């Protein structure tokens, strides 16, 4: 595990965007694992700038980590909508190569199995970006999720629903369940970059890096991954 501590959010976003840019320049036909949340927005903005300067996404396939159950892709709080706004609508990725779990699927369990199949058929993820929850979750894999889970239906914890309520009119509108790639699916990515910014992530980062490897702190599993970088700003690295 490599830890890169940056001065602030902007520098974190820059370092991360440069990793993605170099990867795409070297390997234009690639499978990216993408994340939502506030943290990767700066990185996506910089990638959009790189695209305007010529960076090509035409051969990229992407898989997103998760989606709320009950929200269709055109709901402004859905993760598909977020990705369209932040990245997909602004670069030349082929819409046919964009994969996000379908939160409006009639049978979410079948959707999970299909998603895992699509992931396998694409050959797995070459480069995965992750955020981290204040409770150490990755994707929507909340504390207690066994390390061998593949894409699955999760019940969101109260703390995650509260943290995400800012994207909804009220907490009552935050879905109670989501589909998330599992820890095992994430760990299969050939390279992982985890981003964290701000003091409220410091405890989770310290536990993930130095604490015991335990399902109680899902991100701690990354200590077992052979090619992972944490790119965190000083505030998030405060307890290291
Ligand atoms: P955030 O979410 O980037 O909005 O802080 C990260 C996460 O919960 O994984």
Image: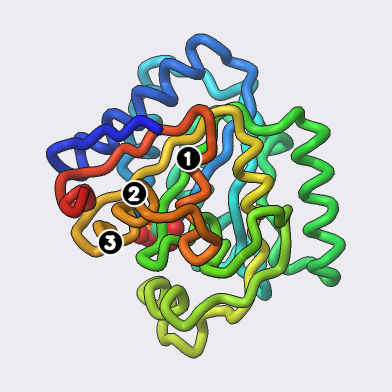
Q: CA distance from mark 2 to mark 3?
A: 10 Å
Decide which of tag 3 and tag 1 comes sooner along the chain: 1
Q: 43 left or right of 239?
A: right
Q: Nearer the viewer, residue 214 or 104?
A: 214
Front tag of 2 and 3: 2
Q: Residues within 10 Å of mark 2 (few under 14, many from 20)?
A: few
- In which of the image's four quarters is ligand 1 placed? bottom left
Tell me where residue 207 sits by quadrant. bottom left
Front tag of 1 and 2: 2
Q: Residue at x 83, y 44 (%)?
A: 117
Tell me where residue 149 sits by quadrant. bottom right
Q: Are marks 1 and 2 in contact (CB under 8 Å)?
A: no
- Compared to residue 123, the image places residue 107 above or below, namely below
- Compared to residue 86, the image places residue 106 above or below, namely below
Q: Are marks 2 and 3 in contact (CB under 8 Å)?
A: no
List the residue tagged with mark 1. Answer: 129
Image coordinates for residue 14, horizontal then vertical, percent: 27, 31
Q: CA distance from mark 1 to mark 2?
A: 20 Å
Q: Residue at x 84, y 51 (%)?
A: 114
Decide which of tag 1 and tag 2 comes sooner along the chain: 1
Image coordinates for residue 145, horizontal then vertical, percent: 61, 65
- Compared to residue 178, the image places residue 28 above or below, namely above
Residue 7: numbered disc: none
Q: Residue at x 79, y 68 (%)?
A: 108
List the residue tagged with mark 2. Answer: 210
Q: Residue at x 63, y 29 (%)?
A: 31
Q: Nearer the viewer, residue 64 or 113?
A: 113
Please tell me whether mark 3 sits on a helix, a strand or a loop.
helix
List the residue tagged with mark 3. Answer: 203
């Amino acid at each position: 595990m490599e830890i890169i501590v940056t001065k602030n959010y902007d520098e974190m976003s820059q370092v991360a965007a440069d990793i993605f840019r170099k990867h795409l320049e070297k390997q234009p036909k690639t499978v990216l694992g993408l994340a939502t949340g506030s943290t990767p927005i700066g990185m996506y903005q910089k990638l959009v700038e790189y695209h305007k300067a010529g960076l090509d996404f035409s051969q990229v396939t992407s898989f997103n980590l998760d989606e709320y159950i009950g929200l269709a892709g055109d709901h402004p709080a859905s993760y598909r909508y977020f990705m369209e706004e932040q990245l997909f609508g602004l670069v030349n990725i082929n819409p046919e190569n964009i994969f996000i779990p379908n939160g409006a699927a009639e049978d979410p369990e079948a959707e999970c199995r299909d998603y895992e199949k699509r992931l396998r058929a694409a050959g797995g993820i070459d480069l995965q970006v992750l955020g981290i929850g204040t409770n150490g979750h990755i994707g929507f894999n909340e504390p207690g999720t066994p390390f061998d889970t593949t894409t699955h239906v999760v019940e969101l914890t109260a703390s995650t629903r509260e943290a995400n309520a800012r994207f909804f009119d009220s907490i009552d509108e935050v879905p109670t369940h989501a589909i998330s790639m599992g820890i095992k699916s994430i760990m299969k990515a050939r390279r992982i970059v985890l981003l964290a910014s701000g003091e409220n992530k410091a405890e989770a980062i310290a536990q993930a890096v130095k604490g015991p490897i335990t399902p109680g702190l899902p991100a701690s599993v990354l200590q077992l991954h052979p090619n992972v970088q944490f790119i965190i700003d000083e505030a998030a690295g405060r307890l290291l």
